[in-house]
Image (spheres, rainbow, N blue to C red):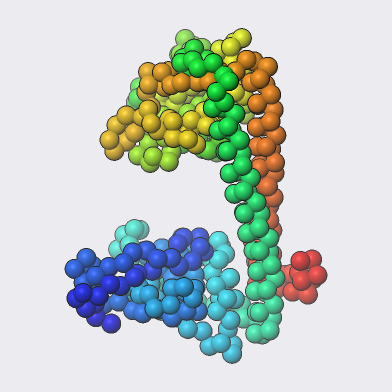
Amino acid sequence: MKIESGVEYPLLGVRWYGQGAFHRETVTRESSKATTVYRVTAGQFIYNRLFAGKGSFGLVLPEFAGAFVSNEFPLFDTKSRRLSVDYLNLYFQQGRVWDYVEAASTGTTASRNRWKESQFLAHHIPLPPLPTQKRIVEVIGAVDDHIAALGAEVEALSAVLRRRRADLITDDSGEVVRAEHAFHFSTGVRRTPDRADGPYMTPYLRSANVGYGTLDLSDVLEMNYDPAERKKFCLQYGDVVVSEGSASANAVGMPAMWRDELPGPVCTQMTLLRLRAREGICIPEFVFHWSMWAYESGAFLDVAGGTNIKHISAKRAKGMAVRLPPLTRQREIAVELDAMGSVLEAARAERARLREVRTGLLAGLLNRSIDIDVAELEN
């Protein structure tokens, strides 16, 4: 339909990786470049032609009935006596299918590649009898219910841990000191072209390697650090690395602890702050939990300077307030919070394992290498 003046049109998008449709924005004739939109109906199958290779497929849920899409989001009604739309949606949740679609998409540039409606309609899918389709949907739905329950448990455990960490780290019985009196601060070296090769190539961590309490070591780069620099910037077990800057406020101050995951020496780049416990004053585990609290509470973000890209300078970080309990109490705090963290990680690991099971189960049910009757008995 043509967009009319004075009317608001809620537009849908489709998330990547099979996450389905969502309300993207509401436009008017004055705010939209489009002149035509298409009304959706609950239960329709939808995909994004531009990002089909990223798994941008899904269903129009009942809450989106009456919303609209542009012509980049084709809509389809299945012949319900032959094809369950839920079964169709499951088929397009597979990574191997996304890879095929990505390879088959065409366009003038990679960023404008599209999987066109004609390609979608010509695509072959396994089509068992309708009762079997529905049973497959029910089996995968049961697994999804378990994953959702684990997700809720993870969220609840995470919230409890954050609250308890805040209570312990901000306990007013601890002496208030400047952070520099509790921790040693250091920044790494700047990455420059002259460090791209040399006799002392050394692995180093950068902001991209630091997540929320975790390290991603799947892509560790190297640059040349001379022996004196290695000694100065080398990580020690228990050091806490903090992402000092980012265009995303959510990433500023994100911390993780180094536990000798890689053989040394491993150093740091300037994009990280390194916090190290002062011997006899602080323990590494307390440094980590204080840093986690400083990130979770926004204390790190509060001391970050900059406009578009926020940066935590070592100078600002050194002046942050730390409520420092005695060493014995620090150990007690660490034991309690580490135990809670272990329970949380176990729940996350179980959720990840179940997601892998789902992937294998779905592929097996669709290619018939797994018998639906056996799958029902196991679930």
Residue at image position (51%, 63%) is 19
Residue lying at the far bottom in this picture: please name it: 81
Compared with residue 180, is residue 23 higher up or lower down, i.e. above or below? below
Rendered location of residue 120, percent (x, y): 45, 76
Compared with residue 174, is residue 296 higher up or lower down, i.e. above or below? below
Rendered location of residue 41, percent (x, y): 43, 81
Q: Quadrant of the N terminus?
A: bottom left
Numbered circles on residues, count: 0
Residue at image position (33%, 79%) is 38
Judged left or right of residue 191, residue 335 is right
Rendered location of residue 251, percent (x, y): 43, 38
The answer to which of 186 and 161 lies nearer the viewer is 161
Viewer can see residue 190: no
Quadrant in the picture for residue 112: bottom left
Residue at image position (33%, 64%) is 25
Rendered location of residue 69, percent (x, y): 35, 73
Compared with residue 169, is residue 84 higher up or lower down, i.e. above or below? below
Q: Quadrant of the C terminus?
A: bottom right
